[in-house]
Image (cartoon, helix red, strand yellow):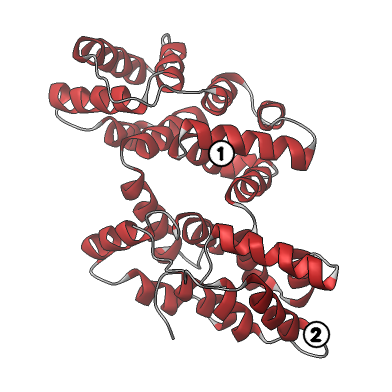
Amino acid sequence: MATLVAPSNHSPKEDADVLWKAVKGWGTDESAIIAIMGHRNAAQRQQIRQAYHDIYQEDLIKRIESELSGNFEKAMYRWILEPADRYAVLANVAIKNLNSDYHVIVEIACVLKPEELLVVRRAYHNRYKHSLEEHVAAHTSGYLRQLVVGLLSSFRYDGGEINPILAKIEADILHEAIKNKKGKLDEVIRILTTRSKTQLKATFNRYRDDYGYSLSKKLLNDASDDFLKAVHVAIRCIDDHHKYYEKVLRNVLKGVGTDEDGLTRVVVTRAEKDLKDIKELYYKRNSIHLEDAVAKEISGDYKKFLLTLLGKEH
């Protein structure tokens, strides 16, 4: 379930007026911006952008970029974008830092539904005048390139059918390939980039039943290179993306310093989808509410905005 609760009777023109008053003249009324944008869904935000442009003849996003700063500006900018455009931006930022951020590309490719991923790839074309796959391929090599480009290019079957015999066969293939770390890595890529998520979950479950531990746990213990780390992220995202995102949040909040980019990415991409479910998992795992953990680590308008998206007013 989503944490965002948007009003059904908002007026794009009235919202645009409030935002214009918040950014005109000296100083900026950040609280007014949060009060509007932090309570509007994706469709409403685009209506506000259009109304603002029609009335004031300027791009709301560019105006807000010029008025805000730091992590607050980055979070608000990504929030206002249409979801597909937002993912395109997140992917491009990750590509520029692919040595450490390839997991973001894998996350996008494996969490989104096939139709959603297709729209993101189209948005990337429009924004950057190159394909997402082309840019990823230019910054990777070897098995990692094959895996990530394959995940991005995949248009998986999205149905619920399962072939138990195939699940057994491919669980064994995955076991042997990861155990030996050579020889059948192309088979790992084939399985992860072509099978439906439902079939893959059946394969992961069969692996757990046959070998006594999860495939992701095996990879966590043995992942010694970027390729196996990327395989681990792909499996976590496909198997249970709620658990994956909970772990991302745990890592960004419990490390030395806070990974604001990771925190922003999870909150802004999941607030309209399933952030409430992720919050519940976080509490079960950490015995602290996500809002309280976030409030301890960040401050200012950035804190106010993320807490709003998390469903906690201040």
Q: Is residue 225 visible?
A: no
Q: Residue 128 appears in which quarter of the rendering?
A: top right
Q: Residues within 10 Å of mark 2 (few under 14, many from 20)?
A: few
**What's the residue at 65%, 44% (across, down)?**
88
Q: Which residue is mark 1?
A: 105
132 vs 41: above or below: above
Q: Residues within 10 Å of mark 1 (few under 14, many from 20)?
A: many
Q: Which residue is mark 2?
A: 24
80 or 99, which lies in front? 80
Q: On the picture, is 205 further left or further right than 303?
A: left
- In the rendering, at what x and y percent does residue 235 appear? 37, 33
The secondary structure type at the circle numbered 2 is loop
Q: Mark 2 or mark 1: name the one nearer the start of the chain.
A: 2
**What's the residue at 50%, 54% (across, down)?**
269
Amino acid at dot 1: Ile
- In the rendering, at what x and y percent does residue 194 appear? 44, 18
235 or 30, which lies in front? 30
246 vs 196: above or below: below
